[in-house]
Amino acid sequence: MNLRKKILNTVRRWDDHLHEAWGPCRILFVISNEIGLASQLPVARILAKSPQFSVRFAFDSEESKLKGIGSGEQDFIEKRKVNRRLATFRKWHYVFHTDVNRFYCRRNAVHALLPHGSAFGNTPKSEDRSLMKRDYRTYAVAQPQINLNLAVSRASIDFSFQIAAEIMSQRNKLHFAAGSPKTDQIFQRRNAPDSDRRVQFLAEMGLSPDDHIILITSHWTENSLLRTLGLDFVRSIATAFPNYKIILFGHSILWDKTRRDLGSKILEMRRQSRSLLDEFSNIRVYRNHLNASQVIDIAELVIVDYSSIIVESCAWDKPLIRLVTPQIQFENQILAQIFDDAMINFDTVESCIEAINSYLFNGDNKKQARKVLVDYFLANQGTSAISIANIVMNAGKVSGMNSPGWKRLTEMSIRYHPNAGSNI
């Protein structure tokens, strides 16, 4: 170790000691996109209520990614926003991420990974065996700076160990079956429905409580619904079911004009999306991922591919019709079977229309299978944000593995035997 590094390490240790002895617990949420922010906000709101925590937000890159979010969320963030460059120099105890990003802290901190989506292992199997292609969640946890894996469930942790045991077993990585904070409101609203809120949301979209709604969703990756079938699929569904309102709700990257690498169908979709609304009075396009749970709630059934919105739809107990093609195969066969059991599959426009008619005329027989899926994917149903906040509250101020609080974090985590891959 050279002299410069020794001096920096000594300064950082004194910095850690000083800020762990005095002042509030400093927490930073690094915002990458709306989808991740939907998991960050519930945790941030809980921690911000306590005077022992100082909660701040910084963007990992462009703030324009959050255009269109509600005024309440915007105000909450604006009051606590810090400049990205300044944030890299400030002292933090916990830094919460949801995605792989380039945000770099120059002082010691515990870096935690919240769920981006509510699923794992749902990336179609690829000849590319890189960790990123096998499972984005595991790839994100594997990043060197990540210390706390706040996974959606124990099954998610098991899956990460199956495909990257050596990295997951590193001493600087602790694992928690935390759940998905963005789904808390789903379970809470199912137990205590808010009809006024639902009616208001429908009105904002130009809909009424009497409307029957089919929600069409799509991931952004190569084999996703819209990149496979395009807007013609949406037109066909709208034509086949003129008495239904069709809501198109695609991944935010699909609408990101800076991404011109998604193929001609998506570029054409962006150009045609406005004319589509003029062409069909029963089509709506919705893009606010902070309100994903609300748009699922108003749907009678949901058309999906392999996006993690499947889990949120099942949490709402919505019937699902899923695109399945030869290119969509999963590495985890348990997960594949759970998906198959919970949904009706289709591979063409015609078979999708047939599946919708089957549901309309024969009813829904997948209710129990959807519950199995939800229980497999989601721990702490309805209380995930509180559970994560409690981890921080119980551990207190921690700056890394050399902090006394690291032992408390370790004791709360799920510990694995590096060979057996099982809980100790």
Image (cartoon, rainbow, N blue to C red):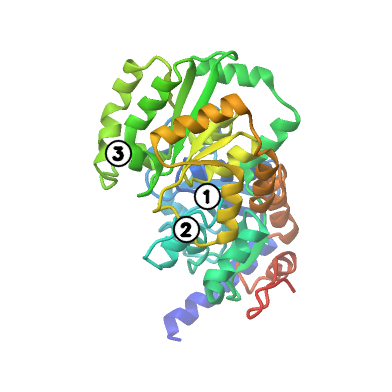
Residue drawn at point x = 59 percent, y = 17 percent:
200
Residue 282's quadrant in the figure? Answer: top left
Residue 183 placement (x, y as % from top left):
63, 41
Identify residue for label 1: 116
CA gap, disc 3 to disc 1?
23 Å
Instruction: Give the number of the mark in front: 3 or 1.
Output: 3
Which numbered disc flags the more N-terminal residue, 1 or 2?
1
SS for tag 2?
helix
Label of residue 266 in the image: 3
Question: Disc 1 to disc 2, how far (Cα)?
Answer: 10 Å
Please state which of residues 319 and 49 is positioned toward the viewer in this rendering: 319
Residue designated by label 2: 136
Q: Please identify the quadrant where the N terminus is shown.
A: bottom left
In the displayed structure, does residue 343 sit left or right of residue 252? right
Q: Secondary structure at mark 1?
A: loop
- Residue at 64%, 48% in the rendered image: 373
Marks 3/2: CA–CA distance: 22 Å
Residue, x 37% and y 26% (percent of image)? 236
